[in-house]
Image: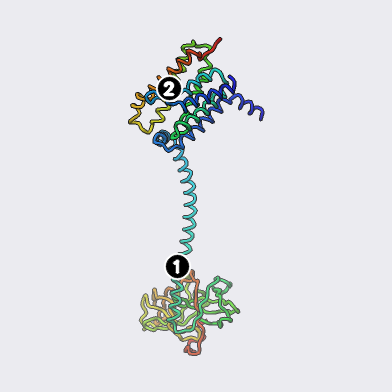
Amino acid sequence: MKTVQILITIIALFLLQFLFSSVLNILGIFPDIFLIFLAYLSLRVRPFWLIWIAFALGMLQDLAFNTALIGLSAVTKILFAWLLIKLSEYERSLNEIIYFSLVSILIAVFINLYDVLYFFGLAQEGLRYFTEYSMPRFLYTFVLFAVAHYFYPLVNRH
Amino acid sequence: MIKAVYDLLIQKSVQISATLLLFLSLFIFLQNDHPSVRKLQTDMADLLLPLKEPAIWFSRQVQASEENKDLTRRIIEMSTEYSRFSLLLEENRRLRAMLDFRERSPFTMIPGLVISSGLQHNLNGILINRGSADSVQINDPIVNVDGVVGKIHEVGIHSSIGQIIAEPNARISVAVRPSNARGILQWYGGNRFIIKGIPSTMAVEKKNLVVSSGFSDIYPPDLPVGVVEDTQAAPDGFTTTVYGRLIVDFNRLEEVFIVLRADDIPEISGARGAER
């Protein structure tokens, strides 16, 4: 994947999430489309660049959407990218569906990890946020990921 | 070497980048003033405390060891200081006693320090830091707060040699109080003296004070010399021999007074020649 393409995509996704949040907003739930983007990039760019892109996206997301906890998205996205790199080493030996499922599980884990860390100091409300926010956010992100995968397969073996 | 490091950096670039960026993100994350961050920091501290305790313990041990060395050094210093102050206190006490003695004494006296002792082969002497420049003359009596020490034997310009009474050649005319029995006192070894020829009719008892009689052109009267410890009848049957202890501790002689002979000191020539 060319650098220009990546930059354009990042800008497009950022604008989509930042300027057209009302379009993506469903009952106060926003998907994390950067996670989907990183999942796609994991099979299309070199691991070194994936780590840096994950860091840049995370910081961008924090600075734009969550100034109270700057660095949290960067932490989770770097870890997510690292696990994607490790998973991509088995991409050829795994079934396409299984691979997609494993990436989806990773997305679920990291959406919840983010929320767990975010609501860590508000432990009494943690469970409520999990059911009312984290889980719906994952489902929303997963649906988008599935739709994207349908039109633009995650694993392109052709 | 440099190439090997470079190759390693290239080979592990992903891991190095991921680690560095992760720590950077965590560092930025932990700078936030947010309840979640505070809770996370306190929970991490609780979690890491058991791991930190041995390190803290070791650090305290090292610190305690250093403190121990420092305290030991300070104890030694303080001990030395205490010893010095004790000496100064004792010296102060002695000097105060001497000052008081000097003020009470009817004689003209100048204070002197004993610089050394045992100077001459045939004389048990002391070296005093006073000489002819201080009006010191031969045969001037030497006393201290306790009593008679001796007399000036030789005089220099700024120092003198004193002959103490605790030596074989010394003689002093004395009187035993309260009977006023008179005799010639001689050293009898150690810190003891002997007085021979006291008439048996004179009542001399143990613990009687022996003072200078004043029958001398050297020692003024009534200067304490010793204390009677024993009396024995002489073989002639008419006299008594008195044994006693000298008052002055000659082993701890540090400050003395030299009694300057004044014109108004009564001189009784009767005893002249008895004292040497």
Element carrying mark 2: helix
Q: Position of residue A77 (x, y in %)?
A: 48, 26
Return the residue nearer the eye: B64 or B9: B9
Up-down: is B272 above or below A144? below
Which type of secondary structure does the marked residue at label 1 adopt? helix
Chain designation of label 1: B
Q: Are marks 2 and 1 on the same chain?
A: no
Q: Which mark is residue A109?
A: 2
Q: Where residue A61 sits in the image (x, y, percent)?
A: 48, 29
Front in this rendered view, residue B158 or B270: B158
Task: Please state if A130 lies on the left or on the right of A41 as rendered.
Answer: left
| Quadrant of the frame with the N terminus of chain A | top right
Picture coordinates of residue B184, whole percent (x, y): 46, 81
* Mark 1 neighbour density, 10 Å: few (under 14) some (14–19) many (20 or more): few
Instruction: Specify the color scheme.
Output: rainbow
| The C terminus of chain A sits in image quarter | top right
Q: CA distance from mark 2 to mark 1?
A: 82 Å
Residue B197 seen by the camera: no
Nearest the camera: B131 or A67?
A67
Give the image quarter of residue B41.
top left
Task: State the mark number for residue A61.
Answer: none
Residue B122 point in image, percent of width and height: 57, 74
Instruction: Locate residue B33: give its quadrant.
Output: top left
Q: Amino acid at mark 1?
A: Leu
Q: Which mark is residue B89?
A: 1
Residue depth check, mark 2 versus mark 1: number of the one nearer the observer: 2
Type of amino acid at the residue the image marks with label 2: Val
Q: Is residue A75 above or below residue B193?
A: above
